[in-house]
Amino acid sequence: MLVPSPSPSPSVSGSTTYCRKQKSLGLLCSNFLSLYNRDGIDTVGLDETAGRLGVERRRIYDIVNVLESVGVLVRKAKNTYHWRGLGAIPKALGQLKEEGFKNNDEQIEVKSGKVSDDEDERISHHSACLLDKVDLDSMHKAAGSFKSENRKEKSLGLLTKNFIKLFLCTNSDMLSLDDAAKILLGDAQNPSLTRTKVRRLYDIANVLSSMNFIEKIQHPETRKPAFRWLGMTSQTNCQTGPVTSVAHQESKKRAFGTDLTNICFKRSKLDDQKLTLFDLQGQCQPSKLNTVGSNSNVGPDQDGHLVPASKPKPCDGGCNKVKTQDWENVESEYRPQYHNQALRDLFVHYMEAWKSWYSQVAEMDKIEVI
DNA sequence: GCATCCCGCCACCCC
DNA sequence: GGGGTGGCGGGATGC
């Protein structure tokens, strides 16, 4: 493989500093959902989306593939996807779980119930049985042939599904990406393959994190980074249907900024002219926000998350107060009921940030009116 | 030094 | 044939 063109270099770009967190897939996913997660959306065009989010088309494919595997989007035609919304997630997760157990049963019948005392080996064995057959078959195919079927087997969408199945259909609600990569590769010991798989899992994990399907944690024993499933608790694992509330309710608060993996309080300057989500000082600048979407009703906050860009119109004295109350009503109505204390705290933190931002906007309006 | 993951090349797909 | 799709891994950034 040829060496790709160098990434924008801080030294080359003079005084600007590159901050990759502002371009992360997780953040992009949050912004994507902020853009489309509302009533009246039926079709998503890739070109339009890339333009509105100010990113390369290639990045949209990554997001779309993951979202498609959890049912949010369905491919309609070239360049076009049908928006099914976050409400379609529970059904998709249910199907994944069903598929996982179905494959599992078939595999167990063939393998005549191997029992292992070793927990890791048990999970690994069990997990490998859950994967789509097409993926299992790929493990036995000779490497090197790059036919279409082989290509599909390695798709980000399929990898996402299998990754989710690991959580939905095993007793482990905590998994390191390294372990996940090894499981998804079967017994492959090729470090290069594992490394590549881990890279893709990072991509997927970032998107799933931004949707709060999973959260990044530190493994209590190994102290190594791992991911925990939030979309379905371990207690109910394999016993109940998919939990709809978390993923669905996240959509309601997404505009407040929910990304778990891209907390970037630094306001780095961007050297990329394509991305205009921030100004050079890291302050929101309405004129530039428009480049995200000329008719979009959202814009980025200081961390790059899209928030409602249409600030309250100056009106009579009580107007802002009423609108503030409206937002507070929205907050209380849509406040997610997290099982996880850290998430609860995080949500409270974001709500405080939102209130602060809103009051600042209200103050600015008062000044403009004066 | 290791974990993370953006970036864009280019092989393959499909109209 | 050509545009769309997306696998892949180099290497930069973050900690």
Image (cartoon, coloured by chain):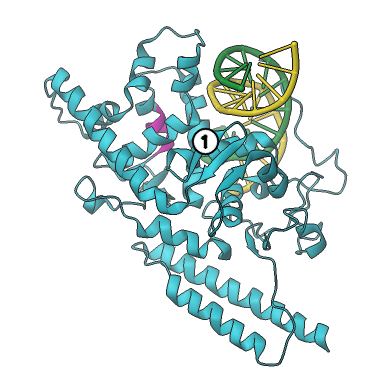
Chain colours: A cyan, B green, C yellow
Q: Pinpoint residue A234: horizontal percent, then vertical percent.
A: 26, 50
Q: What amino acid is labelled 1 in the image?
A: Arg
Q: Which residues are magenta?
A: A176-181
Q: In the image as oriented, which residue stretches furthest toward the bottom?
A: A317
Question: Going by the image, does A114 lie left or right of A204?
Answer: left
From the top left corner, tell me how far across and down residue A318 is, in percent: 65, 92
**Residue A365 vertical placement versus A89 (above, below):** below
Closest to the observer, B14 or A195: B14
Q: Residue at x 57, y 48 (%)?
A: A29
Whether residue A71 is visible:
yes
Would residue A300 be seen by someone viewing this image from the given angle?
A: no
**Which residue is labeled 1 in the image?**
A75
User: Could you tell me which residue is drawn at 25 percent across and 50 percent down?
Assistant: A241
Q: Quadrant of the N terminus of chain A?
A: top right
Taking the magenta stretch, the answer to whether it contains residue A177 is yes
- Residue at 37% x, 46% y is A219
- Give A310 or B4, whichever is nearer the viewer: A310
Q: Quadrant of the C terminus of chain A?
A: bottom right
